[in-house]
Image (cartoon, grey):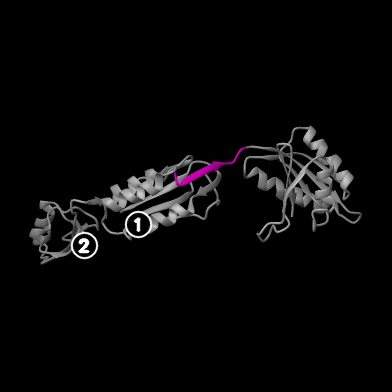
Amino acid sequence: MTFGPVAPEDAEGAVLAHSQKVGGATFKKGRILSADDVTALKEAGFQEVIVARYGPEDVPEDEAARELAAALAGPGIRAGEAFTGRANLFADADGVIEIDRHRLDHINIVDEAITLATLEPFSRVSAGQMVATVKIIPFAAPRGSLDLALKRAGEPGPLLHLHPFKPHRAGLVATRLPDTKESVLDKTRAVLDERLTGMGSEIAREIRCGHDEREVSAAVTALLTAGLSPVLVFGASATVDRRDVVPAGIELSGGEIEHFGMPVDPGNLLLLATHGQTPVIGLP
């Protein structure tokens, strides 16, 4: 692609680099200048205009953005129309976005003309939310560079993948200490209700019991027997060890502790367990 100032009579078929007032009209950046446009420029007194002209290996910005966005769009992702070298990608449903960060980085180092920006991997998204944007920086991208970016976008599968929320009927165990106020448990329930509702799920049953491993075990068993999944356990006292009340109660019910503690804040004391195929989560 060539770029620079030319006389109006040499600008036909070129791409206008900057918006210009031409008589009573505005010629916008990116306009392909026609013979009539050249005449208008000359009549308006322009001695030169800055333009870009495609070479044989150049892909116009909108076409390049459209191709790359289409290659990136995996399940649950749709590509919008390309405009001014940009094509945005959107979520089709509420869910969590999976992004292959390794391939994302390798697309962005192909050529400075080709850029891809995304949300953070595993971000929670809403239907219709923009999750990524392709932007071709100049007025065209080299065909060879675009082909390499397309290859990295589509192999071994789409780089962007939406995992939509699935509705669940959850069970909740909330434990009490002698001085635990019911209002505290009510507030916890309200917060959890709001969070689960936002993901299309609900707490179908709650059991409140003493902060004792045998009572936790009985409550977990009752919710599992009712076919609820996942089972959430909120302890009146924070879990500080795998042998503490909540994990001990889960194990007593027949469950298995998968992991205790997460490198996140808030949420360090998250407890992940399973009972057969049912997730059991000790809330921090």
Q: Name the residue located 55 percent from the left edge and 51 percent from the top edge.
A: 122
Is there CB contact under 8 Å for labels 2 and 1? no
Which is more toward the observer, 194 or 264?
264
How busy is the neighbourhood of tag 2: few (under 14 within 10 Å), some, or many (20 plus)?
some
Which quarter of the figure has residue 201? top right
Q: Mark 2: which secondary structure?
A: strand
Sequence-earlier tag: 2 or 1: 2
Amino acid type indicated by mark 2: Gln
Q: Which residue is mark 2?
A: 20
**Residue 215 in the image: x percent, y percent?**
88, 44
**Residue 82 in the image: x percent, y percent?**
33, 48
Q: Which residue is mark 1?
A: 110
Amino acid type indicated by mark 1: Val
Residue interval drawn in magenta: 158-166
**Residue 245 in the image: x percent, y percent?**
85, 51
How busy is the neighbourhood of tag 1: few (under 14 within 10 Å), some, or many (20 plus)?
some
Looking at the image, residue 100 sits to the left or right of residue 275; the answer is left
